[in-house]
Amino acid sequence: MREEVEEVNHQTHLSTRNKGGLITMPFIIANEAFEKMGSYGLVPNMIVYLMNDYKIGVAKGTNILFFWSAASNFAPIFGAFLSDSYLGHFITIGLGSLFSLMGMFMMWLTTMVPQLKPPPCNQFLETCKSPTHSQFAFLIFAFILISIGSGGVRPCSLAFGAQQINHKNNPNNKRAIESFFGWYYAASAVAVLIAFTSIVYIQDHAGWKIGFGVPALLMVLSVLLFFVASSLYVKIKVEKSLFTSFLQVIVVAYKNRGIVIAPADMFHYLQNDSDNMPTERLRFLNKACIIRNPKDVKPEGIASNPWRLCTVKQVEELKSLIRVLPLWSSGLMMSINVSQSSFPVLQANTMDRHISTSTFQIPAGSFPFFTMATIAIWVVLYDRIIIPITSRILQKPVHLNVKLRMGIGLIVSTLAMVVSAIVEHLRRRKAIEEGLVNDPRAVVNMSAMWLVPQYCLHGLAEALSAIAQNEFFYSELPESMSSVAGSLFLVGMGVANLLASVILSTVEKLTKRNVEEGWIATNINRGHYDYYYWVLVILSFVNLFYFVGCSWAYGPCVDERLKEEPKQGADENLERHG
């Protein structure tokens, strides 16, 4: 009988071990890449579509797009909690993909069905009808579905992919995960690059019907590729509601706030033998897992009331989230710098965008190509050339820890803003010398290629810091919070967009006092965008010290602690035999 049980366990182990692996990577990465390609492909020309086809003014249209972007960036945190608390990664990604597909299909329908948008303007009477309530509602519902889809796919696909290759017993596990994060981010960058170039070109030259049909078709491919590999995935079941767990820890810790913690006299609620004792960090939360009455634990080892007693695991999960938040906040400044996308477009419009003597000129909105290209190039160089060659030279595995890469990325981001300020100063001085101060649309005798270095530096900063942040969140948070880890960077981008708006509005208000035009003027030659860039440089420089402080306060990361443990073991052996 025992032999039969062992055989069953052996077969179960084999079936689990045969799941996942590198064979699942193309399907997961393709799902995320096609989703981004489709959704980002709708963004650049959407304001033109709203103004021309829906007769929506520029202010209202811009606000619609702002709220759409904000919703798409904040939705992942809700998708993450839904995934980690109830549905699991596979179902959340699947539902998110379907929601995105429905949203893009509805957006494509607005180009195909005349009744879904206002009629063309009357050229003789020069009058235009605004969209009806039902037409406007249909449009907004399409935006909502796309944002919901983003909230399901983006926070989960990275964590879901890492689960497929995360084997603790593999000595190369850390390197495999680092490589996956790099290639995942490179694929995402290439997807956005294609969206900002090829799909925008199709919309400009083939019209909205084909231009919006292509993103919908890409989303169909995303859904099919994800579900076709369903039998290959490792699917981890959800055991509890993460949000409820956090709330229980806070409530119980508050109820027990009067308890004086004396470790020698306290018993902590360990649900199973694999749980460890609570850590000393954020000790006030440890009061949530102290057994005050033996009756609080049932004979089978389950808390009789989870709102009176929490497990050590619950407490440590909340602690881990609180601990990463300061370092998360230190990365917001880089996202603020990267989000300054409108000013470089205005600068490029006033500069010579021709390549050498060619008649072809680069569209002003296509310069982000250099940012995305830099990200992709760096990932390939780092993963395939820099790390292997360095390891071969030093004859040992080389790995730059995540906090070091995050710090280097913040430094590069600061340098990008320094270059931006210098280039704008030179461009503005050139415009004044050529007598173009009152003509913001005139092209100065200065190549737009001067803008390329700042775009490349932004790309390098994002390749270093953004990838490191995602890896940091995933490695530092428990596996049960992997979707939350995947959504933190996206939420940071949303917060950074709001902070960038606050900074811009504040600078404009302060510099416009008692003068007609401040630094942020409509006439780019009369304004001082270079001064605004220097403000961001100062804030970025201050943020570097904030990052160093947060990094020091956090202490060693998981990879650093793993390196220290063998050394401590060796020292103990020396002392024992000495």
Image (cartoon, rainbow, N blue to C red):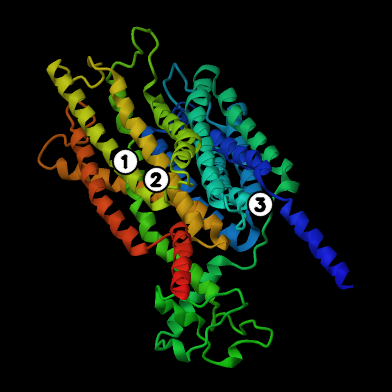
* Cβ atoms at labels 1 and 3 below 8 Å apart: no
User: Disc 1, disc 2: CB below 8 Å?
Assistant: yes
Q: Give the image quarter of residue 303.
A: bottom right
Closer to us: 109 or 386: 386
Residue wearing tag 1? 413
Please name which of the two marks, 2 or 3, marks the residue nearer to the observer. 2
Q: Which mark is residue 90?
A: 3
Q: Residues within 10 Å of mark 2 (few under 14, many from 20)?
A: many
Mark found first going from the N terminus, 1 or 2: 1
Task: Say which amino acid is labelled 3.
Answer: Phe
Residues at marks 1 and 3, CA–CA distance in whole angstroms: 35 Å
Separation of marks 1 and 2 at Cα, in angstroms: 9 Å
Kindly identify the amino acid type of the residue bearing the numbered disc 2: Ser
Instruction: Tell me the quarter of the image containing the C terminus.
Output: bottom left
Query: At numbered mark 3, what does the secondary structure look like: helix, strand or loop?
Result: helix
Mark 1 Cα shell of 10 Å, populated few (<14), some (14-19), many (≥20): many
Q: List x then y, in percent, for residue 195.
A: 51, 29
Q: Which residue is mark 2?
A: 465
Numbered disc 2: secondary structure: helix
The total of numbered circles placed on residues is 3
Q: Position of residue 37 (x, y in %)?
A: 55, 33
Examine the rendered structure and indicate whether residue 488 appears above or below residue 245: above
The quadrant of the picture occupied by the N terminus is bottom right
Q: Looking at the rendering, which quadrant does residue 429 occupy?
A: top left
